[in-house]
Amino acid sequence: MAAMARMGALIEVVAQPIYTWLFGIATYGLYIVFWSAVNMAEKVVDLSLTQALQRIVPVENEESAHGAVKFALLVTVIPALLIAALIAFFSPQIAGCISAAPEDAARLPQMIALFAWALPLWTFVEVATSAARARRAFGPEIRLRIFWEQCARLVFAIGFFFAGWTSIGLLLAHLLSLFLVAILSLRLLGRYYDLRLMMRVPVPAALRLHILLSGIALSPSAIARRILNDLPPIILNLILPGAQGATAAGLFGIARKVASVPLIVRQAFLYVLAPLSSAQAALDRAKIAPLYAFSSRLSVALVMPIGGLLILLGSDILSLFGPGAETAMVALVILTLGRMGEAVIGPATPIVEMTGHRLLPLINSMIGVCVWAVVSWMSVAEHGPEGMALAVSCGAVAIALAAVIELQLSDGLHPFDFAFLRGLVAGSVGVALLTLFGMVFEPLGAPVRAIALFVLIAPLCWVTLRLGLDQGDREALGAFARRTGLI
């Protein structure tokens, strides 16, 4: 269910070329910098209570669960509102630190003051939807955040452009889409919790302390992931002057967005494994092993051919973003290889975070950030977005690898058996077949080659699942496997 809901993320990938054509790569890069800054600030403000709820809600009684959600909302949204007000007040001073094209530079203070209010809206959405996820409501939460948010943003952006609004229109479209999703998030919260009970339920000091300690222990890991995902375009914008900095951030944002397509599969397991692992750890930790192994096998069998398709069609995809976007090709290849590497290593990170290993997420975070910082220092100054892509990929893979090693040492869990090797071989064969088909269709021209590979990816993924998963794994896919003939 979560994987199908995550398919809504493809809307975002389709929307990005529209934004670059309408508003230009430099303005798009500025938008990426602003949104990355909001994401970074939100991850600090929420104290990882979004993840703490995954630990606490499944094992508490109803009154305590409602109290935990109420406390999480209060201690995150109120500070976010105060920070937004401060950013809006000091927007002229902040504008002096940001690189922008000449046509955007004069409006920077106004743009910053406007977009600052995305922080409390996004904080509320994150906490409210994580509370629904803690109830194992994966599909509705993801559809709301991925599908409806992206559709609303795209409609607003197109409307503002034709109304004569330029860069301000793109930011306002984002803000209005967040406002809409915040309203829908409140309705989602009322679907899985009693809002009246939440308003009046007391939150004992012991529960407040438990929530804060659980969240703060997970914060370094969450912040590290945000550093690897959102700090790179900000740094590129800061170290390069004027339009060059805005364009570099835009190119990296384009490459990152396209390379995120394989993340649809991995992110589905990250969403699901967190609350499931938390609930299972309270009963029998040994039974986490089949969940972990199954997720790893399915992930590698799907992500490898999808990643291979992105690399093969990278130049065709980037051409959709307008003139100049093709220079992001190297960054796209590096980031996609990094995503494929994470898939091969497996989704161990949420299991480490949700099964009581409070210190290990901090260790993983430091490892990933240190690797990213070292590679960035060595490569970004000379290679720009390509060097940053290499640093991000190395850091992300380091975090995933550290989690795998820790689970093996602490609980004796690992997914790397013969069944996993079978999935890895099937995924690798899928990549090889795609490459072969690409060579066969090359003489027919780029459009024919691209269309042919897009048509072939679905049956090829069916083959990798059929050959890469055993009978039990395929049966675990339920109705999907029956409808598609996998069993």
Image (spheres, grey):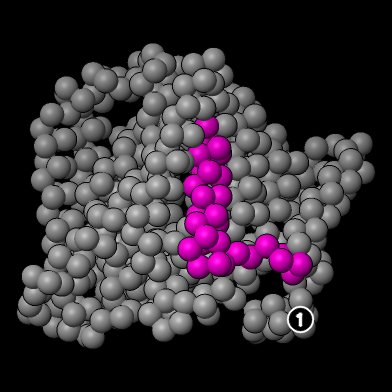
Asked whether 231 or 33 is in front, the reply is 231
Q: Quadrant of the C terminus?
A: bottom right
- Quarter occupied by residue 444: top right
The secondary structure that most of the magenta stretch takes on is helix
Packing grade of label 1 (10 A; few <14, some 14-19, many >=20) is few
Residue at 63% x, 72% y: name it: 294
Q: Quadrant of residue 209?
A: bottom left
Residue 208 located left or right of residue 472: left
> In the image, 476: left or right of 28?
right
- Check if residue 407 falls in the magenta segment: yes
Q: Whole-percent x and y of residue 152?
A: 39, 56
Q: Position of residue 155 (x, y in %)?
A: 42, 52
* Nearer-the-camera pick, 176 or 126: 126
Percent position of residue 424, x then y: 75, 58
Look at the picture and state if 324 lies above or below 353. above
- Amino acid found under the numbered disc labelled 1: Gln
Residue at 33% across / 59% down in the picture? 358
The residue to which callout 1 is attached is 471
Q: Which residues are magenta?
A: 391-420
Q: Residue 469: percent from the left, percent from the top? A: 75, 72
Q: Residue at x 75, y 41 (%)?
A: 312
Whether residue 85 is visible here, answered yes or no, is: yes
Q: Is residue 249 above or below residue 127?
A: above
Seen in the image, is 22 located left or right of residue 78? Answer: right
Q: Secondary structure at mark 1?
A: helix
